[in-house]
Amino acid sequence: MEERLYDLIFIARPATPEEEINKVLSGIEHTCAEKGGKIEKTEHWGTRKLAYRVAKHREGIYVYQQIRTNHGELIAELERRLRVQDVVIKYLTVRLDEDLKRQKKLMGKREQRAARRPRRTPPAPPSATEQTAAAS
Amino acid sequence: MSEEPKQAQAPSGAPRREGGSGGHGGPRREGGGPGGPGGPGGRPRGKRQYFRKKKVCKFCVEKMDFIDYKRADILSQFVQERGKILPRRMTGVCSRHQRWLGVAIKRARNIALMPFAGSAAGTQAPRAVVPAAAAVEAPKA
């Protein structure tokens, strides 16, 4: 199975001490190691205002991770663990690789088109002009 | 009836046209515009005078092939004050990007980066009402 890239964001309670968050992170790391996944990056966004109330909190500590894995079960397992954690009030996992693949494809197309355009205009081959004339 | 005013206006319109941009279709029609209210008498003058600026898809201009749900600052431009997703006809986003935009906004809502309903101001307003309750909660947690 090909590799998949996931986003994992979780929100911890605003008053959580740093050790607790690190404990959660190490737990994620542990399950990743167990199920064959790799944490690409980890970002601490810090305390942010929530757009709506979550578990009676208006703020939360955001932690963002990117995980690369071959097994979808890893994500299911991670979600199960996050759900159990008392510190985590909300989490989200998003599969990213399909979107990124699409992005890459579109970028390639755009570059192709950009490369084709200048070539067509300066030499103005007779075949191209004939084609356009026939088309019009 | 309708021909006479046009003929009368044509000479007066001609120098204007020369002085202007010298375009073909546009200026002639503009010359006919003032004739309109004189003839049928129904059309308001303002109808031809304003024309809407063509809206261009912002994501196409910036060549974004992927709309990141984490960038709430970008997404919030395409949302009403109360958090509703703006229709395409308001923002000029192309259909493809609007589709992606919808997905991105919904993801952002899921993780509380964007509101489902009610703005950030909406959540601030009740906050002032319940500071006492919040203060009671805080020490408990």
Image (cartoon, coloured by chain):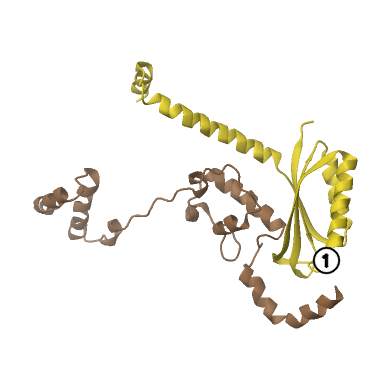
Q: Residue at x 28, y 58 (%)?
A: B49
Is residue B98 rendered to the left or right of residue A37? left
Q: Position of residue B23 (x, y in %)?
A: 22, 44
Is residue B37 rendered to the left or right of residue A29? left
Image quarter for residue B25?
top left
Image quarter for residue A82?
bottom right
Position of residue B78 relative to residue A94, above or below, is below
Q: Residue at x 36, y 25 (%)?
A: A122
Amino acid type assigned to the residue bearing label 1 in the image:
Thr
Which chain gets the brown colouring?
A: B
Q: Residue at x 10, y 52 (%)?
A: B4
Residue that label 1 marks: A16
Chain A appears in which tint?
A: yellow
Image quarter for residue B36?
bottom left
Is A60 or B25 nearer to us in this picture?
A60
The answer to whether residue A80 of the structure is visible from this angle is no
Q: Residue at x 48, y 28 (%)?
A: A115
Is A18 or B120 nearer to us in this picture?
A18
All told, the count of numbered labels is 1
Numbered disc 1: secondary structure: loop
Q: Position of residue B93 (x, y in %)?
A: 51, 49
